[in-house]
């Protein structure tokens, strides 16, 4: 069984898809042992509580240094004996200690086709707004292993989504989630657990 920590900052629709796929038996080898949020008001926390999943709140701003923040996150992963970390809309940078300890055991979902519309500052609605402003005709989502630089690390899966003439950043964000993200994240989890057993 893979003991997963899901890290979130907001609504938690990607967390919900993982919960659903575990409940449905699609992700047979996974158990979410903790949800860690950077934001105490994140709706994702209510989703976790509804399923009795323990929650932890750790905001980078509450720590004097990256090292202290990194230590606090490592303590949580030790307490819950975490094997694998999923960044599901998590918007803070991770420290080197955690990244080294979980080398190629942390994955992230990003709302664009990396290497387009990614890197520092590209999160949430911003990749979608930038893609429309650029005049791109295709965008999508990417799941990748997390390395030290923003949105770097080997790509696991990608899915493209067409940008329509009348798309707004909001309509595009919604379609990228529905058509790409909510399928890619569970599928990537399954791919990885298959590889590692
Ligand atoms: C998702 O679109 C995810 O791809 C994005 O934040 C959203 C979270 O939604 N992540 C990033 O932008 C990371 N760079 P959710 O809280 O409903 O899962």
Image (cartoon, grey):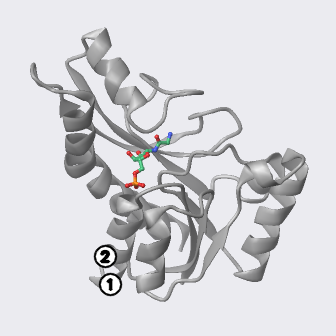
- Judged from this view, the residue extending furthest toward the top is 134
Instruction: Answer left or right for 72 relative to 187.
Output: right
List x then y, in percent, for residue 8.
53, 59
Q: Secondary structure at mark 2?
A: helix
Q: Answer whether labels 2 and 1 touch (C-beta < 8 Å).
A: yes
User: Quick one: label 2, few (<14), some, or many (20+) residues within 10 Å?
Assistant: some
Instruction: Answer left or right for 76 relative to 171.
Output: right
The residue shown at (27%, 56%) is 183
Give the CA distance from mark 2 to mark 1: 5 Å
Quadrant placement of the N terminus? bottom right
Label 2: which residue? Answer: 20
- Judged from this view, the residue extending furthest toward the front is 41
The residue shown at (48%, 35%) is 123
List x then y, in percent, for residue 155.
47, 40
> How many labels were placed on the picture?
2
Q: Nearer the viewer, residue 96 or 15?
A: 15
Task: Respond yes or no on whether mark 1 lies under 8 Å from ligand 1.
Answer: no
Task: Tell me if residue 77 comes above or below residue 73 in the rendering.
Answer: below
List x then y, in percent, for residue 169.
27, 29
Image quadrant where residue 87 sits: bottom right
Label 1: which residue? Answer: 23
Q: Secondary structure at mark 1?
A: helix
User: Quick one: label 1, few (<14), some, or many (20+) residues within 10 Å?
Assistant: few
Image quadrant where residue 16 sits: bottom left
The residue shown at (21%, 51%) is 178
List x then y, in percent, for residue 144.
50, 44
The residue shown at (56%, 73%) is 4
Image quadrant where residue 2 sits: bottom right
Task: Respond yes or no on whether mark 2 lies under 8 Å from ligand 1.
Answer: no
Instruction: Answer left or right for 135 relative to 40.
Output: left
Task: Tell me if residue 31 comes above or below residue 180 in the rendering.
Answer: below
């Amino acid at each position: 069984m893979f003991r997963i920590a899901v890290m979130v900052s907001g609504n938690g629709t990607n967390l919900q898809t993982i919960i659903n796929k575990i409940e449905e038996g699609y992700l047979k080898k996974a158990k979410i042992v903790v949800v860690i949020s950077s934001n105490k008001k994140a709706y994702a926390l209510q989703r976790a509580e509804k399923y009795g999943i323990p929650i932890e709140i750790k905001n980078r701003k509450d720590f004097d240094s990256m090292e202290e923040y990194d230590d606090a996150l490592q303590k949580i992963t030790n307490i819950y004996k975490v094997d694998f970390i999923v960044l599901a809309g998590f918007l803070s940078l991770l420290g080197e200690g955690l990244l080294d300890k979980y080398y190629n055991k942390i994955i992230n979902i990003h709302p664009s086709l990396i290497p387009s519309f990614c890197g520092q500052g590209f999160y949430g609605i911003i990749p979608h707004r930038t893609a429309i402003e650029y005049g791109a005709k295709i965008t999508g989502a990417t799941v990748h292993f997390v390395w030290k630089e923003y949105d770097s690390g080997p790509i696991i899966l990608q899915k493209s989504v067409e940008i329509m003439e009348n798309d707004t950043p909001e309509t595009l964000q919604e379609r990228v989630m529905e058509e790409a993200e909510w399928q890619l994240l569970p599928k990537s989890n399954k791919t990885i657990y298959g590889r590692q057993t």
